Amino acid sequence: MANEIRIGLIGAGRIGALHAQLLRTRVAGARVVAVTDINAAAAHKVAGDNEIDVVEQDAAKMIGRSELDAVLVCSATHVHEEQVCRAAEAGKHIFCEKPLALDIGAINRMAEAVEKAGVMLQVGFNRRFDDAFARVRTGIEHGEVGDLHTLRVISRDPEPPPIEYVRNSGGLFVDMTIHDFDMVRFLAGAEVEEVYTMADCRIDPQIGAAGDVDTAVIMLRFVNRVIATIENSRQAVYGYDQRVEAFGSEGSISTDNVYPNSATVSTASAVRRDLPLRFFLERYTESYVNELTAFVSAVASGSPSPVGVADGRAPVVLGEAALRSYHEKRPVKISEVGG
């Protein structure tokens, strides 16, 4: 295609491989033409699986390739700042997985680099592009629930990640809850004023030994008086539990979990159905397609990012506030942590 967006992929792990596959099979108007990863075997596998012509030995070389219009940063969080800033300086549009960074200062420097270069950066908060959650947002915007009073987000994983991952993840609040922080901002249409956290380690003592928690309830008060709660757990034995409810003066709107089928089994002893989908790659496949389509469209049209740097910064600030609230056992104003 003459006007095809040419993309370089940094990171050939699980999410990078998924993006490469979806860009090849489901997203029109773009093609991954180069890939790099510190694991050369992973990079070559993704290239072979997805008809990618070039495997570069390092990210800097790939970013410097003149034929690229954009890069997808799907690498480890601690190298996001360097790679995003380098890509901005090279004039490439950028898609960066969450979190942008674990440090607010790093995110601010990334924002400055993107603004100075005049390129577009989209943060990988794919759940905004989930049809069910987007419908809740539309219902709120159109006044279907009246004056919005409360939001409730339930986000529970089917099983804890490996302990090696936990030790380097940045903790529950910036690894797992970050999606939920973004979701409540997305739904409320306002900024958070105050956060209060109660959390514990109830599932795996190794998580506690690593200095993290695996179970949490977080309350958030927004500047528009909306009150939100987020419930997190690293283990829901029945599957991937992802639900949202918005409640207001005229009613409520909510989403259920996604199931592999719609069948219901009714017998003399029980009425039941199969368990919900168990893994995030299954649950959110369509949202990944939608977010990549939005990125390609924004690059092609020169439109603003649908999920910009400010959207990437705010959940990290909220994560810091939640962690401080947990340790200090008190509500924390966002202004206390640089919000």
Image (cartoon, rainbow, N blue to C red):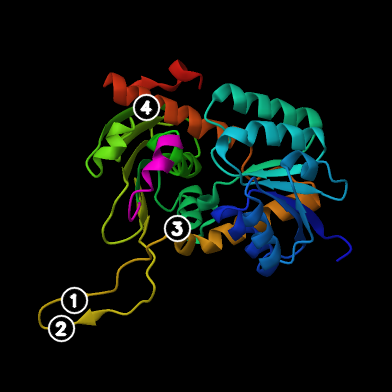
**Contact, mark 2 vs mark 4 (Cβ under 8 Å):** no
Q: Residue furthest top?
A: 336
Q: Nearer the viewer, residue 196 or 8?
A: 8
Q: Position of residue 218 (x, y in %)?
A: 32, 35
Q: Which residue is mark 3?
A: 280
**In this picture, which residue range is highlighted in magenta?**
157-168
Amino acid type shown at disc 3: Phe
Q: Is residue 285 left or right of residue 79?
A: left
Q: Position of residue 37 (x, y in %)?
A: 66, 48
Q: Nearer the viewer, residue 33 or 93?
A: 33
Mark 3 → mark 2, Cα distance in angstroms: 31 Å
Q: Is residue 54 left or right of residue 143?
A: right
Q: Is residue 300 left or right of residue 73?
A: right
**Contact, mark 1 vs mark 2 (Cβ under 8 Å):** yes
Residue 217 visible in the picture: no
Q: Earlier in the sequence, mark 3 or mark 2?
A: 2
Q: Residues within 10 Å of mark 3 (few under 14, many from 20)?
A: some
Residue 261 visible in the picture: yes
Amino acid type shown at disc 4: Leu
Q: Residues within 10 Å of mark 1 (few under 14, many from 20)?
A: few
Amino acid type shown at disc 1: Val
Q: Which residue is mark 4?
A: 323
Q: Which residue is mark 2?
A: 267
Amino acid type shown at disc 2: Thr
Task: Pick the quarter of the image with the N terminus.
Answer: bottom right
Q: SS for tag 4?
A: helix
Q: Which residue is mark 1?
A: 271
Q: Nearer the viewer, residue 235 or 314?
A: 235
